[in-house]
Image (cartoon, helix red, strand yellow):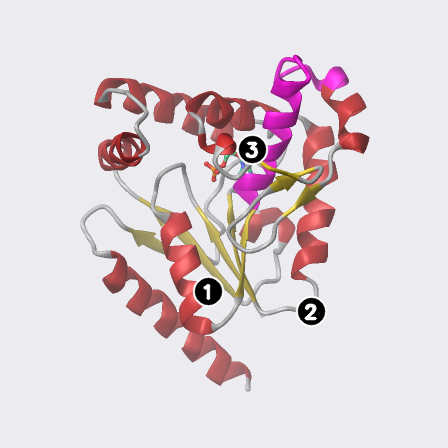
Amino acid sequence: MIVTIDGPAASGKGTVAKGLALRLGFAYLDTGAMYRAVAFAVLRAGKACDDGAAIACLLPDIHIEMPPDRVLLNGDDISEAIRAPHVSQGASKVAAVAAVRAFLVPQQRRIGSGRDMVTEGRDQGTVVFPDAPVKFYVTADVRVRAERRQKELDMRGVATTLERELAELIERDRRDSERADSPLRQPSDAKVIDTSHRTVEAVLDEMEGVVRRCKTDRA
Ligand code: DC
C-alpha cells in the first residue's frame, strides 16, 4: 500500500512522512533527496542546473542509492551535502528538466513496487502514484515555513536570516508550482493537512488514523 505526501518546501512533510512510516512499519521514500542528488552531481560536474542538454548527458552516469537515512551518489555519501541551500535551489531547477523527471520517476515507482511505503515529494499523488489509496497534501503558512527552515539551518551552523529564507522559499515554491512538467499541485483526492499551528504528534495521530481506517476498509 502506497501513502503519498506532497506539499511545498519546509511544510513539515519530511518530518511527518518519516514519523508516519515509523508508526505504520512502512518503508519511507524521500523523492526530494533524489532531485537534490541530481543537482549535486550537476554542480559537481561544473554544469548549470537549468542546462537541460548538459544534464541529459550526465544522467546515465548518475547512480543514486537510498539506504535508510542516507543518500549515496555513485557510492559517495552525500546525505549532508545535499541539504546545503545552493543544492536546494539547484534541485528545484533540475526538477523542471523533463529528462530528469523521466529518469527519476521510474526509479521511484520501482522502489515502491509491491511494498508498503510512505513517499513524499511534489508529484507523488498526482503523477508518480496516482492510484495510491491514501494521499495527503501537507502545507503551512509561508512565514512559519521560513522560520522552520531558519531554525533548521541555524542548528546545522549555517548563517542565514528570516528574510533570506522567506525569499528563497517563495522563489522555490514559484518554480516548483509553475514548471510545465509535473508541477506541485494538490491532488484532488488528497486530505489537506495544515501544520502551521499543530504539533507533529497531533498531525501524526490524524494521518495514522486516516491510513488505518483505509486499511480496514480495504481488508
Ligand atoms: O522536498 P525537497 O525540498 O527536498 O525537494 C527538493 C526539490 O526537488 C524541490 O524544490 C522540488 C523538487 N522535487 C520535485 O520536483 N518533485 C518531487 N517529487 C520531489 C522534489
Q: Where, by quadrant of the figure, is residue 129 drawn?
A: bottom right
* Label 1: few (<14), some (14–19) or many (≥20) C-alpha neighbours in 10 Å: some
Q: Residue at x 62, y 47 (%)?
A: 127
* Label 2: few (<14), some (14–19) or many (≥20) C-alpha neighbours in 10 Å: few
* Label 3: few (<14), some (14–19) or many (≥20) C-alpha neighbours in 10 Å: many
Q: Where, by quadrant of the figure, is residue 133 drawn?
A: bottom right
Q: Is residue 139 left or right of residue 4?
A: left
Q: Pick the residue in front: 213 or 157.
A: 157
Mark 3 vs ligand 1: CB under 8 Å?
yes
Q: Amino acid at mark 3?
A: Arg
Q: Where, by quadrant of the figure, is residue 159 drawn?
A: top left
Q: Is residue 51 above or below residue 211?
A: above
Mark 2 to mark 3 CA distance (whole Å): 26 Å
Tag in front: 2 or 1? 1
Q: Quadrant of the N terminus?
A: bottom right
Q: Residue at x 58, y 43 (%)?
A: 71
Q: Amino acid at mark 2?
A: Gly
Q: Which residue is mark 2?
A: 114
Q: Which mark is residue 36?
A: 3
Q: Is residue 34 left or right of residue 98?
A: left
Query: Residue 209 placed where, x, y %?
Result: 35, 74
Q: Main secondary structure of the magenta part?
A: helix
Q: Helix, strand, or loop for circle 1? A: helix
Q: Which residue is mark 1?
A: 21
Q: Amino acid at mark 1?
A: Ala
Query: Residue 11 placed where, x, y %?
Result: 34, 43
Q: Residue furthest toward the bottom?
A: 219
